[in-house]
Amino acid sequence: VLSHPHIVTIYDIQEEGDVAYIFMEYIEGSTLEKMLLDEAPAKDQILTLLRQTAAALDFAHAKGIVHRDIKPANIMVRKDWTAKIADFGIAKMQSQSMTQTGMVMGTPSYMSPEQIQGKTVDGKADQFSLGVIAYEVMTGEKPFVAESLPTLLFKLVGEAAMPAIRLNPTLDVSIDAVLQKALAKTPDQRWESCTAFIAALEEQCRQYPAWTTQTRGQVSL
């Protein structure tokens, strides 16, 4: 059982025929996805949400559970600005069958290269997805975009992300370096843990406090 302050509690999972039912904690609030559509949250709020999400992911990873679909729509935000990761129940239900069949689960823009390639994944895959989210909330754009799915998957597997500083000039190159390490193509080149990633990000953000967040669509190249 994943019991953590920043994970939506799963009370029960039942199956009836081909339909699975998940009974989970009700969260009064919104999703990070909906919030980003309105306006960019304050940078202190963003870093708090990222820190809480990282702690929850590392907790799950220590128990051998990989979420596989970390994205803004799966990060619930309560009114007191507490982050709660949703859909861990689905990750637990499908992880064994996917390992056996080689199925790919996830949302393309946030998927790690190893997920796309159908390789065995561990917590570093979730870290990559968290890196995509951090990049997105700090620049207003996803690090990998394309007009077609094949092109997007090609970029995720084989192309480096555009430097974040090009999309948001208020960022420093050291902040971008932290993001780029989380977005490394191979897992062993990423941070030791999600918490280590966000701790490094927060440290560089403290070093360069003039940075600001950007809303989606604000960037003009």
Image: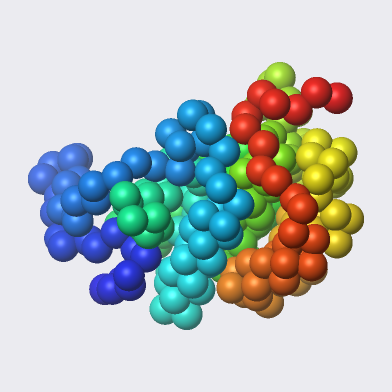
Q: Nearer the viewer, residue 112 or 59?
A: 59
Q: Nearer the viewer, residue 46 or 55?
A: 46
User: Residue reaching furthest left?
Assistant: 16
- Residue 86 image point, x, y percent: 35, 53
Image-based side of 32 in relation to 13, left or right:
right
Q: Is residue 8 visible?
A: yes
- Residue 114 image point, x, y percent: 67, 55
Image-based side of 159 in relation to 93, left or right:
right
Query: Which quarter of the rendering shows the N terminus?
Result: bottom left
Name the residue: 66% across, 43% down: 213
Name the residue: 39% across, 42% down: 31
In the rendered view, how is the structure colored? Answer: rainbow
Image-based side of 193 in relation to 27, left or right:
right
- Residue 60 image point, x, y percent: 43, 72
Name the residue: 43% across, 34% down: 34
What number of labels is visible?
Answer: 0
User: Residue reaching furthest bottom?
Assistant: 62
- Residue 36 image point, x, y percent: 52, 36
Q: Is residue 197 visible?
A: no
Name the residue: 32% across, 70% down: 5
Q: Nearer the viewer, residue 134 or 214?
A: 214
Q: Nearer the viewer, residue 165 or 206?
A: 206
Q: To which quarter of the image does residue 80 belong?
A: bottom left
Query: In the figure, 149 relative to 119: above or below?
Result: above
Q: To which quarter of the image does residue 2 belong?
A: bottom left
Query: In the figure, 189 relative to 81: above or below?
Result: below
Query: Which quarter of the rendering shows the C terminus?
Result: top right
User: Residue reaching furthest top?
Assistant: 147
